[in-house]
Image (tube, rainbow, N blue to C red):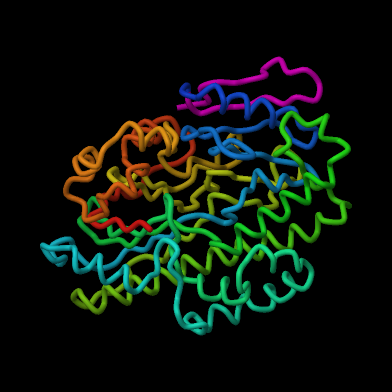
């Protein structure tokens, strides 16, 4: 479907349009989008994906192109959060009837929730790749040392770990009954510390101009600002950390599968894509910084991953390079109610019913992740048929959450 809604179509000077790929947007999210559109640094327009919903700092499911400036709170604190997936040669009938032991084994291999690797050299090779950047980061920004307990150990021992919330590891089956490994995570504690640090710096730098901002969380760094280059360096490091974190977890999960399942090979290259990040690109005749907050890159023929909720299907997609979306698409189903509202409305029995047939946690600790708290993934996909083509449809048989 094409763009469903355009805000500010007759926008006054200084306000850009907002092109939205759904007709269902909560009022608070619409206001956030309008706030972003007022910023003088935004180029051409703002795009809102069909999974759009209220976020902190900026709307989740938004794509924000900015000229010579970046909004740290729009990038957020889970810098580089995204997806990783790989298809194996395993067939569904090669999985055991009882999947609980396999789920338990993966949870032992990959620390989840607040867990981390016990050995400081657990992911030694990957850490060596990231260590020079980490050293520069801590030297330039000793404040980060105050935000993390044992900062050197934190980023090292959390590499190759899942975290909590909506982060997950899944074993999935596609339309041909091939077995996939898919996971969702980001830059863990170090990314959070970097995000918070620079959000605070941006607010401090713009303290004298806050009255000109529609929202204090939209404070930004402009090129030439003393912190601009530092933020670019830090955010790029955190995004690389997030990519490597997912890569290391995939290795751990595949190793676990090799210990418990018949011999197999990988039949596709891993897809590893961010959906909370900033990158330099060219759109509508300008070099810009594109912030995708809850959106993935969908350049023509580029592969991406769009997960549903823990009880719904997910999709491997190929981008169509749609210019109006800044070559982007949705990053998932998107929440339709807050975590607090979901916990108040649903019970453990509801969770058990909505995840029937899936080996996963079904306790009160994950009720806020219940499928009914998310938008209908089929409707999301229908609304972005101009943005991506579906390559594979996946259904999970194991879902691991922290």
- Quadrant of the drawing holding the C terminus: bottom left
How many marks on residues?
0
| Residue 18 sits in quarter | top right
Name the residue nearer the viewer: 100 or 14: 100
Name the residue nearer the viewer: 61 or 387: 61
Residue 394 visible in the shown view: yes
* Residue 23 pos. (x, y %): 47, 21
Q: Which residue lies furthest to the left in this view?
A: 97
* Residue 33 pos. (x, y %): 63, 29
| Residue 288 sits in quarter | top right
Q: Which residue is drawn at 66% across and 62% down?
A: 147
Q: Is the magenta stretch mostly helix, strand or loop?
A: loop
* Residue 61 pos. (x, y %): 53, 38
Q: Which residue is drawn at 78% across and 42% down?
A: 67
Residue 226 in the image: above or below residue 202: below
Task: Please provide the residue range marked out in magenta.
Answer: 1-22
* Residue 302 pos. (x, y %): 50, 52
| Residue 249 sits in quarter | bottom left
Residue 266 in the image: above or below residue 383: below
Residue 347 in the image: above or below residue 103: above
Q: Residue at x 60, y 21 (%)?
A: 6
Magenta-drawn stretch contains 42: no
Residue 385 visible in the shown view: no
Q: Which residue lies furthest to the top in this view?
A: 10
- Quadrant of the drawing holding the N terminus: top left
């Amino acid at each position: 479907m094409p763009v469903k809604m355009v805000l500010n179509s007759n926008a006054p000077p200084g306000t850009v349009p907002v092109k939205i790929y759904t007709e269902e947007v909560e009022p608070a999210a619409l206001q956030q989008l309008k706030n972003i559109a007022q910023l003088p640094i935004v180029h051409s327009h703002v795009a809102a994906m069909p999974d759009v919903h209220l976020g902190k700092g900026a709307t989740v499911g938004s794509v924000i192109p900015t000229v010579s400036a970046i909004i740290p709170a729009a990038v957020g604190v889970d810098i580089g959060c995204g997806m990783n997936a790989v298809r194996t040669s395993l067939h569904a009938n090669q999985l055991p009837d009882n999947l609980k032991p396999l789920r338990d084994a993966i949870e032992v291999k990959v620390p989840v929730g607040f867990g981390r690797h016990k050995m400081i050299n657990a992911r030694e090779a990957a850490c060596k790749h990231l260590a020079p950047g980490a050293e520069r980061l801590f030297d330039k920004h000793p404040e980060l040392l105050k935000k993390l307990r044992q900062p050197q150990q934190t980023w090292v021992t959390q590499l190759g770990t899942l975290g909590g919330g909506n982060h997950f590891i899944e074993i999935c089956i596609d339309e041909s009954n091939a077995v996939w490994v898919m996971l969702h995570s980001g830059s863990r504690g170090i990314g959070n510390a970097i995000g918070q640090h620079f959000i605070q710096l941006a607010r401090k730098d713009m303290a004298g101009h806050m009255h000109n901002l529609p929202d204090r969380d939209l404070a930004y760094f402009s090129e030439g600002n003393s912190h601009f280059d530092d933020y670019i360096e830090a955010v790029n490091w955190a995004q690389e950390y997030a990519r490597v974190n997912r890569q290391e977890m995939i290795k751990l999960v595949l190793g676990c599968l090799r210990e418990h399942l018949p011999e197999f090979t990988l039949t596709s290259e891993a897809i590893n894509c961010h959906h909370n990040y900033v990158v330099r690109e060219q759109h509508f005749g300008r070099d810009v910084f594109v912030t995708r907050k809850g959106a993935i890159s969908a350049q023509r023929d580029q592969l991406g991953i769009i997960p549903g909720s823990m009880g719904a299907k997910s999709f491997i997609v190929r981008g169509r390079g749609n210019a109006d979306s800044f070559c982007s698409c949705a990053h998932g189903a998107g929440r339709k109610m807050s975590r607090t509202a979901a916990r108040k409305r649903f019970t453990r029995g509801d969770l058990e019913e909505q995840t029937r047939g899936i080996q996963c946690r079904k306790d009160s600790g994950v009720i806020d992740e219940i499928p009914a708290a998310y938008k209908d993934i089929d409707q999301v996909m229908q609304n972005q048929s101009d943005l991506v083509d579906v390559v594979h449809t996946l259904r999970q048989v194991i879902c691991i959450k922290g």
